[in-house]
Amino acid sequence: MSTSSFDQAAQQFDSLFFGPARAYAALSLDYTEKLVAAQFDAVKAYSDLSLTQARAILDVKDADGLRSYVEGQQKVAKDLSERFKGDAEKVVAMNQEFLQEGQKLVEESVKSASKATATATSAKAATK
């Protein structure tokens, strides 16, 4: 096997296997990074809210303070449910984006493999 044949085979192997594997690994790493960042953001927001509520209950000194605190809990519950909804929508959007990008990578790999197969087939036919 000549050097040019070996180089061509190595290049085809890279384009058919290693290239798509690297692209998928990069996509997975980007997705994981975004997901972890979203989780850290959510945990920070929920922790801040919890600490704020704990401090608010410590500030209750009388019946009026308790009434004010309880009334404020409705707003906190509403804000929290909106935050949950927003976080869930964010994760769903990230999942959909990941799936779409993964699908594109698969389609590109199939096209590349089909092209390489056609090229190899035509090259073999030309040498006969």
Image (spheres, rainbow, N blue to C red):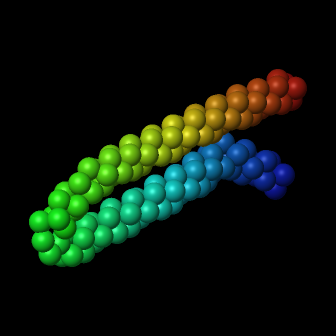
Most distant residue in the right direction: 126
To which quarter of the image does residue 121 belong? top right
Residue 31 percent location from the top left of the image: 52, 52
Residue 99 percent location from the top left of the image: 52, 37
Q: In this view, does 118 lie above or below 79?
A: above
* Number of marks in the rendered image: 0
- The quarter in which the C terminus is drawn is top right
Q: What residue appears at the point 17 percent right and 72 percent down from the top-left corner?
A: 60
Q: Is residue 115 left or right of residue 34?
A: right
Q: Is residue 36 left or right of residue 56?
A: right
Tell me, yes or no, if residue 36 can be seen here: no
Q: Is residue 55 above or below residue 27?
A: below
Q: In this view, does 72 lie to the left or right of 96?
A: left
Most distant residue in the left direction: 63
Tell me, yes or no, if residue 44 can be seen here: yes
Q: What residue appears at the point 84 percent right and 52 percent down from the top-left corner?
A: 4
